[in-house]
Image: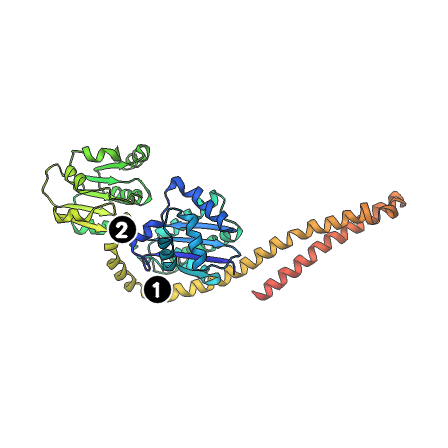
Amino acid sequence: MKRFTVIAFTHKTLELEEVGRLHLDDSIRSERLQSVKQALNLDELMYVSTCNRVEFFIVGSQPVSIEFIIRFFSAFAPNWSSELAAKMAHAAKIFFGRNGIEHAFRVASSLDSMVVGEREIITQVRNAYEDSNKIGITGDFIRLAVKHTVETAKQIYTDTDIAKAPVSIVSLAYRELLKLKVKLDARILVIGAGKTNSSMTRFLHKHGYTNFSVFNRTLDNALAMASEISGYSYSLTDLLKFNKGFDVIITCTASNNHIITPEIYKSLLVDEASKKVVIDLAIPNDFDESITNDYPVNLIQVSSLKELAQQNIKTREKELVRCNEIIEERIVEFTLAQRKRKLEVAMSEVPKTVKEIHQTALTEVFAKDIASLDDSSKEVLNKVLAYVEKKYISVPMKMAREILIEDE
């Protein structure tokens, strides 16, 4: 466990726009993370990216320091200046060993989230592991750590009221729409077909909204989302010539530049003067805020949900004591499970080694003596050796299990 470290960047230590610098596009994620693992000579690596946090789970022999993180970013973001890499390195929160496991448990249980009690994070952690495992950068320790992380989060959601009346970013945005009394037949433009927008549109569709137009760089992805919500699909380049008007824009893309510029917004209005709603869930923002200087807009952003999240934390503080108790219990369980796993890996070599000794004794050390025996004697000798081999394998296994049980 001592070789495990979490490097975390969240809304607590960075502006959301700066967290956005750490998001990797799907097209480069695999290659970039494999480069990081190789460049830093890491045993294991896992990349977690959500709307307000980016974290790296690493297992390796090198001490994780500011200098290490700067070298880490040289591989992770080779286009960054040394000044930017140093700035980001100093903004990182680092959790070592047991503290790293505790942090992972708290993250998946939403206790470290902008909105305590949101269930979305547990799925994001699980998916992050699956994505990292698929490209071959995780290993046995992270596999076991994530397994216990997910189990801990599930227990907290089940055994406490921390997730009662859940208020994820999506549900918070939906509540804001309700406050604005947006009608069910409102014309909704959805820009970006990623996970956040997919969750948002499915949520809206489930609650009766029907008029969706989906725009995305990859038209096939727009079509896939639109088919789920009975909407229309367009390429992102069609935004500037879209002339059917809108009441609500929901946008969340991975772009580093504004998608909704003053020019595009004016075009989308098609001379309508009514106040519109814009839900910008992107980091960095897709919507150019200067637009609000010239047009009436109800703007809902991830950053504007912070205050609501803080209110949510206060109402759920009474549950945190029980959550912390569960986490402490689960850390003890993980520690024991990890020790058992290390023992299993170490002991798995015993049968192979014993068999090699057995074979060497027969074919080399005592080969001449055995050759002089008759068939009956050879048969008895083989039985004796087989019995000794079996017992020699089982005895240390049993002793090891007993030691672990005593410790437990």
Categorize mark 1 by other alpha carbons within 10 Å: few (<14), some (14-19), many (20+): some
| Residue 148 appears left or right of 10 | right
Q: Position of residue 161 (x, y in %)?
A: 34, 60
Q: Secondary structure at mark 2?
A: helix
| Residue 295 appears left or right of 404 | left
Q: Position of residue 226 (x, y in %)?
A: 28, 35
| Residue 383 appears left or right of 68 | right
Q: Secondary structure at mark 1?
A: helix
Categorize mark 2 by other alpha carbons within 10 Å: few (<14), some (14-19), many (20+): some
**Mark number, residue 171:** 2
C-alpha distance separating marks 2 and 1: 21 Å
Q: Residue at x 37, y 67 (%)?
A: 321
Count of numbered marks: 2
**Type of amino acid at the residue the image marks with label 1:** Glu
Q: Residue at x 46, y 53 (%)?
A: 146
**Type of amino acid at the residue the image marks with label 2:** Ser
| Residue 172 appears left or right of 21 | left
Question: Does 125 appear above or below 321?
Answer: above
Question: Which mark is first along the chain, 1 or 2?
Answer: 2
Please report contact status of discs 2 and 1: CB closer than 8 Å, yes or no: no
Return the residue nearer the eye: 320 or 269. Answer: 269
Q: Residue at x 42, y 55 (%)?
A: 70
* Res 309 → quadrant: bottom left
Q: Position of residue 42 (x, y in %)?
A: 51, 51
Q: Which residue position holds label 1?
A: 319
